[in-house]
């Protein structure tokens, strides 16, 4: 399953993680940060999520000297994820639950991106070096949450494959 069309079909209709792993294994380490941050920016665009945490990751991703701080940023995303998950169990209003689910998806994408940034700092303790394989699947999950149309899927796929 090395053909781009087959991988796209797998990402869209099958095992999005397996498709993501195939894609991530082909991303050059010199461009992996660009790849991941473009996906993160796109996730913010389609989700309309913007807060101090996401803004902080955007700033961090623009400065390679700060990549080693990404592990701390990961913890912040993980903490936010747990807070939102707990909140989700307490909220009954569907529209609020939906917004929380969208932000949860963005948190997962943020966690993955922080792992990629941290690993680019060449740490002595790499952090889930294969995490990037989960990024395309996490983006697909977000697209489902925002009820994305075919155009959004195609734009996302182009980002995932470095076509745009």
Image (cartoon, helix red, strand yellow):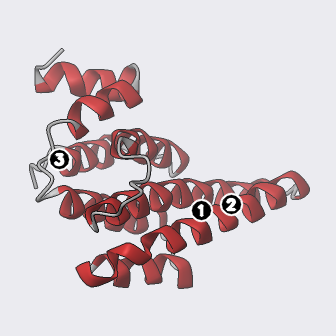
Q: Earlier in the sequence, mark 3 or mark 1?
A: 1
Q: Is residue 63 visible?
A: no
- Gap in Å between the C-alphas at discs 3 and 1? 23 Å
Mark 2, secondary structure of its residue? helix
Please tell me which residue is depicted at 76% across the width and 65% down the height of the picture. 83
Residue contact at pointers 3 and 1, CB within 8 angstroms: no
Residue 161 higher or lower than 116, as above or below:
above
Report which quarter residue 140 is drawn in: top left
- Location of the N terminus by quadrant is top left
Q: Nearer the viewer, residue 41 or 76?
A: 76
Position in image of residue 67 (x %, y %) = 33, 74
Q: Earlier in the sequence, mark 2 or mark 3?
A: 2
- Gap in Å between the C-alphas at discs 1 and 2? 5 Å
Mark 3, secondary structure of its residue? helix
Q: Look at mark 2 in the image and give the residue it sits on.
A: 100
| Neighbours of disc 1 within 10 Å: few (<14), some (14-19), many (20+) | many
Q: Hey, which residue is sitting farthest top in the picture?
A: 1
Q: Look at mark 3 in the image and give the residue it sits on.
A: 158
Position in image of residue 76 (x %, y %) = 60, 72
Residue contact at pointers 2 and 3, CB within 8 angstroms: no
Position in image of residue 106 (x %, y %) = 51, 60
| Neighbours of disc 3 within 10 Å: few (<14), some (14-19), many (20+) | few
Q: Hey, which residue is sitting farthest front in the picture?
A: 124
Q: Look at mark 1 in the image and give the residue it sits on.
A: 103
Position in image of residue 124 (x %, y %) = 36, 60
Residue 76 higher or lower than 156, as above or below:
below
Please tell me which residue is depicted at 33% across the width and 28% down the height of the picture. 11
Q: Nearer the viewer, residue 109 or 115?
A: 115
Residue contact at pointers 1 and 2, CB within 8 angstroms: yes
């Amino acid at each position: 399953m090395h053909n781009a069309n087959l991988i796209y079909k797998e990402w869209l209709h099958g095992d999005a993680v397996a498709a993501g792993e195939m894609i991530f294994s082909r991303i050059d380490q010199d461009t992996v940060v660009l790849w991941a941050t473009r996906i993160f920016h796109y996730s913010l665009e389609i989700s309309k999520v913007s807060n101090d945490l996401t803004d902080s990751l955007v700033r961090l991703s623009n400065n390679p000297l700060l990549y080693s701080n990404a592990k701390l940023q990961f913890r912040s995303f993980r903490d936010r994820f747990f807070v939102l998950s707990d909140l989700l169990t307490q909220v009954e209003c569907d529209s609020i639950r939906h917004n929380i689910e969208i932000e949860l998806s963005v948190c997962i994408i943020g966690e993955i991106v922080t792992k990629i940034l941290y690993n680019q700092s060449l740490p002595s303790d790499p952090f889930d070096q294969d995490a990037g394989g989960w990024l395309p699947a996490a983006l697909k999950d977000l697209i489902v949450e925002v009820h994305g149309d075919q155009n959004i899927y195609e734009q996302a796929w182009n980002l995932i494959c470095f076509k745009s």
